Image (tube, grey):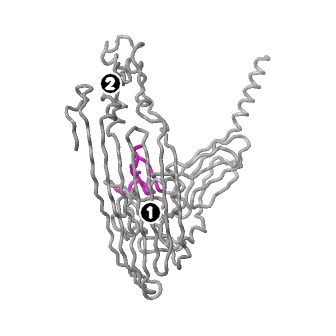
Amino acid sequence: MLRIVLITIFLYLFSTLYAQNRMIKGTVTAKDDGLSMIGVNIIVPRTTNGTTTDFDGNYVIELMPGEDTLVFSFIGYLPFITAINNREIINVILEPDQELLDEVVVVGYGTQKKSDLTGSVSSVRGEDINKIPSASAAQALQGKVSGVQVSSVSGEPGIAPVIRIRGVGTLNNSSPIYVVDGVILDDIAFLNSGDIASIEVLKDASSTAIYGSRGANGVIIITTKRGKGGNGENQTINVSAEFSMQHLANKIDLLSAREFAEVVNVITPGTFNNIDRVDSTDWQDLVFEDYAPLQNYHVSLAGSSGKYNYYFGAGYFLQEGIIPKSTYERLTIKLNNSYTVTKNIKFGTDVTVAPEKKENPAGVVGQLYRAWPTSVPYNDDESFAEVLGAGNPLAAIEYTNSNTETLRGVGTLYGDITFLKDFVFRSSYGFDASFSKIKIFTPAFFISSSQSNALNDLS
């Protein structure tokens, strides 16, 4: 009898404790366009408990006893605070920040206040972009604009991210186009984030109509910095330096040497006579570096001298990869200037020159995932050993020397004539030129019949 009573009390206490934890779920949408919002932060105040919305704007959060308030926040929108009470489903509509609506944004045919826009346009300021260390300004858009998905296709240094605006729009190519100071481009990898004044993302048909079918997947308009009017009073010098470390977040879970030997023996019996004594090699530990540095330096000079306004920026970016001998190096020179001839006539140039160098041993990642974990990397004499499966990844790094050097120039020459009160006629000439040189050198070596090179090869 006593045993039954104790069990009953235990079950009652357990059920009471369990019932104190609650699961809250719901959907977050934007009031301005009614679309689901990706990446909205949902937190419990004064705790570390929180979550974010998924690609459909949905969220689920588990609340501990005493947690009765949720805060919803997203850049460009007013935070929303709500009491939970006894609700299990809480759907939220976030309102745009009215102060941001008074900002002047760039659209395809000029500039407007956000409050006057009927299309869907999101704006990101240059200061917000510079807060995130990244190889390109495109990566800095991640999590800053609703409806914009930014993802990396690989960990290769300097690789351009994939951007999708409101999902996949076309079958062949779903990437948006970029407009940098009036020049339409396919990528912005050459830009230094420190030279950017603002980024506008045009999402819907009414906003992108001026670009025709090219804007079917959205348009990203980038305005670079320039000097402000005055007589030398607004001259500014900015210097910034960033240093950060990258590391491999997770390794792929592969079979151990013993597990691999067991599988091989099932397929080909007798391959390994004693699976307890097979060699064991973790190729991911051997190939991947623990940390890889990322450096970004930028200096700029902006100002005016009477009728002449100028902006000069110089940036240096260096990203090393977690695979040895993989690097991306870029130097960016930016010059924007304008000269006011009369009250109604102005001429100017916006020019960016960016030499870059990229080194990456090709195919190493595929090799290390296919290399047998029962193979050893080195022979007794410390030479590279033959590795079954796909060759020796360490030898591939040692003997593969691939360098790509690119010089790219992007700019525009323009003239403005102002007439009546609010009309400006602009004539401009834009250019985008690039020159690349690829050098691949493979020395003579022999590891196995499937991994060798008879003669020195330079191409």
Residue at the image position 58 percent from the left and 64 percent from the top: 96
Q: Secondary structure at mark 1?
A: loop
Q: Position of residue 82 (x, y in %)?
A: 68, 54
Question: From what the image shows, is residue 239 above or below residue 230?
Answer: above
Residue at the image position 70 percent from the left and 52 percent from the top: 83
Question: From what the image shows, is residue 383 above or below residue 33?
Answer: above
Residue at the image position 44 percent from the left and 70 percent from the top: 107
Which quadrant of the figure contains the C terminus?
top left
Q: Is residue 211 left or right of residue 242?
A: left
- Res. 203 mark: 1
- Res. 232 mark: none
- Res. 383 mark: 2
Q: Secondary structure at mark 2?
A: loop
Q: Which residues are magenta?
A: 147-170
Q: Position of residue 404 (x, y in %)?
A: 31, 49
Residue 406 located within the stretch drawn in magenta: no
